[in-house]
Image (spheres, grey):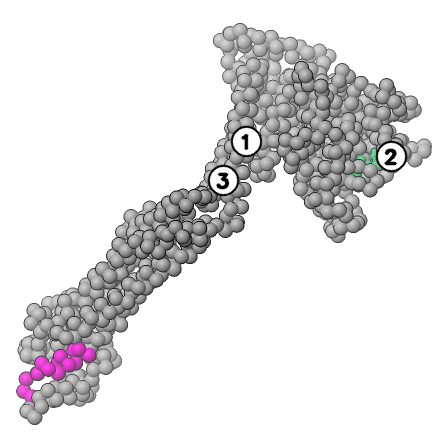
Amino acid sequence: MGEETRPAVHSLRTGTRTSPALGSSLIPIINKLHDILAPVGGGLTKISLPQVAVIGSQSSGKSSVLEALVGRDFLLRGCDICTRRPLVLMLENRPETPGDDGKEWGEFRHFPGKRFYDFSKIRREIQAETEKEAGLNKGVSAKQIFLKISSPNVLNMTLVDLPGITKVPVGDQPSDIEARIRKMIMVHISQQNCIILAVSPANSDLATSDALQMAREADPTGRNKLHGSRTIGVITKLDIMDRGTNACNFLLGKVVPLHLGYIGVVNRSQEDINNSCSISDALSYEEKFFQDHPVYNSLSGCCGIPQLGRKLNQVGDSHFFAHIAHIDCLIPIHRAPWIPGFGVLLGVILFLTNSLHFNLFIGCAMADFMSQILEQHIRMVLPSLKSELNAERYSVVKELETCGKAVASYEDKGSIVLDILSKYCKAFSAKLDGSSPDMFTKELSGGARILYIFQTTFVKSLEEVDPCEDLSDDEIRTAIQNAAGIRNCIFVPEVPFEVLVKKQIDRLLEPSLQCLQYVYDELMKISRTCEVAEMRTFPVLRRNMDDIMRKFLRTSLKPTESMIKNLIDMEMDYINSSHPNFLGGSKAVELAMNQLKSQQGSTDVEKGSSTEKGQKTRGSLLPRLTLPNLGTPSVNDEKPASSGNASMRTWGISSIFGSRGSSGERLARSRSLGEPDHSDQMPSRIQLTEVNHAKRQLYETFIQKLHRQDLFDMLLEEQDEVVLKRKCNEELFQVLDKAIQTLEEVESDVSTRSSHSSFGNDDAITCSPRATGISTRQNLRNRSEVISSYFHILE
Ligand SMILES: Nc1nc2c(ncn2[C@@H]2O[C@H](COP(=O)(O)OP(=O)(O)OP(=O)(O)O)[C@@H](O)[C@H]2O)c(=O)[nH]1
């Protein structure tokens, strides 16, 4: 087979005998979109980009079919070499320009900018890339290899070569290899925009073909009892069938009927490959084979690689036409006011374009029409795609913000440290003052929580202090007797009172220190919520700040503690018995006597029972006193005779200070101790020495400890993951940015085209021809031509 026998046309290669490239003018836009979207990842694949996937069992001839379609030797095929990673092959038609000698080249996505003019090097690169990912020993990987072939001689199309379905694991293949490969294949062919080339070798049982079975799974819908709406059956190895048998019934769809039908092909055999038979020679051989074959020569419509290429072009476009345009564009076009009945005609065309026979006849006019429909679809999906890309870019920007900026110079580092420290301190103050923008709404936090500690927790803990606890009547009696010395005691003396009171004031220390501890804990908690975003990228700085903060708060804890102790000591040292609320012994007795008189009758029983309670209780020594003008009596006051501590608290020494109960009473009682309200004083001291001190001194402390040039490098050391994350996000940002720019170009391309097209523009559809002037009249003329050519075809 010599070069002179080379046929004029190669299936997907352009030439005089190829069928019109339906919609091919649009495919560069789609390929451009594909290019945009591929690096961005799987998430943004809402736009249906057309592709043709070749599936079948191992060694069924998939790569051979693809190579024949492309017209170049570059794929992994043969006895011992097989496809082990999906190969996405983007054929790009490059218009020939002056000076362009029509060279063809390949470019891998993983080698951007590097053109491979030698196709055998492309094959070697595919093999190397396969081995890199899937190892040397038959392993497979789902990671795609992207290869763009640029040529003035190919039609725009995306083809995907997939690993063959295999049943028995060999080499490094895992035991579930079949399931894995099937899954990998399904990912591609289940996409609605994917045309499936289901390859089955004629020398095996076609009825049990893996390819057809999988295609049916992914593309089950059909019409007129035929299967699949986007599956083309390809039968290879027709040349090596058993003598006396043929695949005629299959090719005619009598065994497994397919809506889009079958094409039978003859590729190069292994021997042909070994003998370096070229593809063109093989195509010539194939052509001759079918011509000379007694059965296949009458089935020329479904035999041969050129026929497959033609069908692919037609089906490819009509598939998109039917699948996309039918859904998205029929309704507006149907409304077209200027051509009565046009929508009905279009419906008929849509129906017919899904028929294999009609596909074989549609011509240039249909191609134009489909282009416009496809354009309209692209125009419709572009805005949502763009907003998706914008949203993605926004989230990348947010991610980048969490990575912080990469820093180099000392000045930069210094200002970054300063900025972080100042932001942190501002956030801390804001949390205390309640001016933080990110405050909680579900629970108290920050300064409000400290106030709660002061006003509620601390007050409650003071209330729980029983001033008479552990103070028995015997102790009081003994103290009074000791104070009288050798004399008899007639009046209640002051000295034993002071001795006893001091002991009890000491009991206020514990709740006060507890209050301080709560405030400290709260400040620590606040400090943890003040983390500024930039801190996250500098773990060393963050650790140091935490450390300093803890020490700083702890340092101020000590003086506050001793201040609290001093305050308690002061209260003990001087009992202010001239305070108006102070009830001295004589006043207490006087009040008691008055009360006794007024209650004489009614309290007989009570008194009796109290007396019965025992001579040892404090009630036996001192009358029960209340301060009726200081608020509602407590529950305890209402049950003086009940047993236990509660009843005892209303008697004895506590009665002299005023009864327990409402806070008004409590204040009166604490004041009577000579203390100008412990529950007010203590918080203000803690506020001063702990809280305000932290607000005022924190920034200065940070600056002193951390804003030092010799520390900058260490403090701003970044984690490797952060550096990597920043790098990835920066790259992704660039890609997305470029993608958005390209998309805008595509948008303007499409809108320019649609403003010139007949059906692509919604305005044109709804405007009256008279109103839209010459261009619309021109459009109408074009449309009339298109429609009359349809009628011609239909006839
Ligand atoms: N005689 C003959 N041999 C063919 C035909 N098609 C393919 N072969 C041979 O079958 C073998 C396998 O072909 P490939 O194209 O590598 O098959 P494949 O399906 O891509 O194989 P995997 O990638 O391993 O799944 C090769 O030796 C081809 O030369 C054909 O139509 N006739």
Q: Is residue 687 left or right of residue 766?
A: left
Q: Which residues are magenta?
A: 489-503
Residue 147 appearing in the image: yes
Locate the N terminus and report the quarter of the image it occupies. top right
> What's the distance in space between the residues labelled 1 and 3, CA to CA?
14 Å
> What's the distance in space between the residues labelled 1 and 2, CA to CA?
44 Å
Query: Residue at coordinates 20% horizontally, 77% vertically from top-left?
Result: 504
> Which amino acid does the dot numbered 3 rest on?
Val
Rendered view: 311 above or below 609: above
> Which amino acid does the dot numbered 2 rest on?
Asn
**Toward which corner of the image does residue 654 lie, by quadrant?**
bottom left
> Which amino acid does the dot numbered 1 rest on?
Ala
Which secondary structure lies at badge 2? helix
**Residue marked by disc 1:** 739
Q: Is residue 751 left or right of residue 564?
A: right
Q: Nearer the viewer, residue 726 or 754?
A: 726
Q: Is residue 546 left or right of residue 130?
A: left
Query: Residue at coordinates 35% horizontally, 48% vertically from top-left?
Result: 418
Q: Which mark is residue 274?
A: 2
Residue 228 appearing in the image: no
Is residue 280 highlighted in magenta? no
Is residue 496 highlighted in magenta? yes
> What's the distance in space between the residues labelled 2 and 3, CA to CA?
51 Å
Mark 1 burial class by Cα count in 10 Å: few <14, some 14-19, many 20+: many
Locate the C terminus and report the quarter of the image it occupies. top right
- State ligand 1's quadrant: top right
Q: Are marks 1 and 3 in contact (CB under 8 Å)?
A: no
